Amino acid sequence: MAHYMHIESAVIHGGIYGDYSTGAVNTPVYLTSTYEQDGLGKPRSKWEYSRTGNPTRAALEALIAELETGTHGFAFASGMAAIDAVLHLFRSGDGIIISSNVYGGTFRILDKIFGQYGLRCKIVDTADLEAVKNAFTTDVRALLIESPANPLLTVTDIEAVSGIARANGAITIVDNTFMTPYLQRPLELGADIVLHSATKYLGGHSDVIAGFVVVKDAELAKRIHFIQNAVGAVAGPFDAFLLIRSIKTLAVRMEAHAANAEKIALALQGCPAVKNLYYPGLQTAQGYEVQKKQAKNGGAMISFELQNDYDINKFFNGLKMIALAESLGGVESLVCHPASMTHASVPKEIREQTGITEKLIRLSVGIENYEDLHNDLFNAIKGARR
Ligand SMILES: *Cc1c(COP(=O)(O)O)cnc(C)c1O
């Protein structure tokens, strides 16, 4: 039984805290591939080979399971490796419904890899509950969503769609990368599997590539562990250590990220140069009420378009502090151009249909001083006028 009640403590004390044999307050980095056995059939400990299990990774896996209020966590070499492991649960002929805007790599692995093996993916606007209901043909085994989704921050009612999936004998998988368990816990809302690119907020410092799967069901846990061990895309011990260290500050970082983002979103809303603005923490945003119900705040991702008389290249070139780069969720603010960067693998017709236009700019708001951020962003907007 944990001797704390709140997630701000769980991020620091959760999982397997410290090291019993030495009293070290931090989990050691077990840089070992294998473990000596005392004789045939006589393992000295529960560890036998580090693809199957490693104590540093196990501490991290216990931590993410606890934070997401699941029973089992699994750490992978990347977010895509985590998604790949989950997709291995399905077989040829199975259908999967995905949100109409998801991470480009999620679309790509379904379209180009699992499509080869007969997995069928259906793109649905999962914010529209009627559309979700209608999409459930008998072959559909799962619903894979992001909320808010990448890059238009579309909010899906996780509790409602999980109910629809369950009623149709399908499972719900939520990629919780944009929110983290500090802001939103999909398993509590009825989802069966939570996915993460831990590369983003959980890592938080743009220095590690990793991913997670979390479940709350023993049978599903057994299957995911089998796949993790059989396929082998595990997180290494040093990356596991970095993540344990990063997650200790998750609560304070997420508060700082969201506080900056809320102010930036309001400033963009009041700026005549801005055409379309997407941020689920704004009262005027699509899904604001659902976001308020299922998450602590609107997070720190903002997407927007500038008016036609603004030049997007000039805007990117005008930024001095905010870096143009793929990725998100680090302490430093980053901007990207989804159409040519994170979502380039999504066919142009689908991009246009779903609103991922050539003019869309995605901003990952960091935890720098607000005034510095504001000045950099609005100077670049001002300088982008044709
Ligand atoms: C980045 C990202 C991924 C992929 O994770 P990697 O760690 O880059 O493999 C998956 N989903 C979302 C929402 C992401 O932002």
Image (spheres, grey):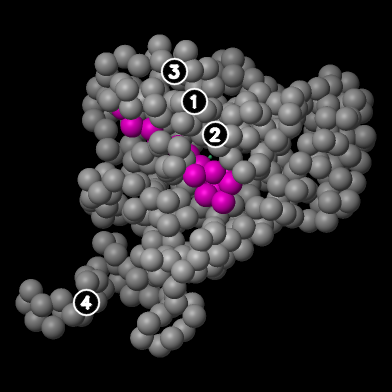
Q: Secondary structure at mark 2?
A: loop
Can you tell which of label 1 and label 2 is closer to the viewer? 2
Residue 136 belongs to the span the image colors magenta: no
Can you tell which of label 1 and label 3 is closer to the viewer? 3
User: Which portion, as a residue range, is magenta?
Assistant: 170-185
Left or right side of 68 for 316: right
Q: Residue at x 38, y 32 (%)?
A: 172
Whether residue 19 is visible: yes
What's the CA distance linking mark 3 and mark 2?
A: 14 Å
Left or right side of 39 for 237: right
Whether tag 1 and tag 2 are in contact, CB under 8 A, the answer is yes
- Give coordinates of residue 338: x percent, y percent: 64, 32
- Give coordinates of residue 265: x percent, y percent: 78, 36
- 277 over 258 or under it: above or below: above
What's the CA distance linking mark 4 and mark 1?
A: 44 Å
Q: Which residue is mark 1?
A: 99
Q: Amino acid at mark 1?
A: Ser
Q: Which residue is mark 4?
A: 45
Q: Which residue is mark 2?
A: 147
Left or right side of 5 for 284: right
- 315 over 15 or under it: above or below: above
Residue 184 belongs to the span the image colors magenta: yes
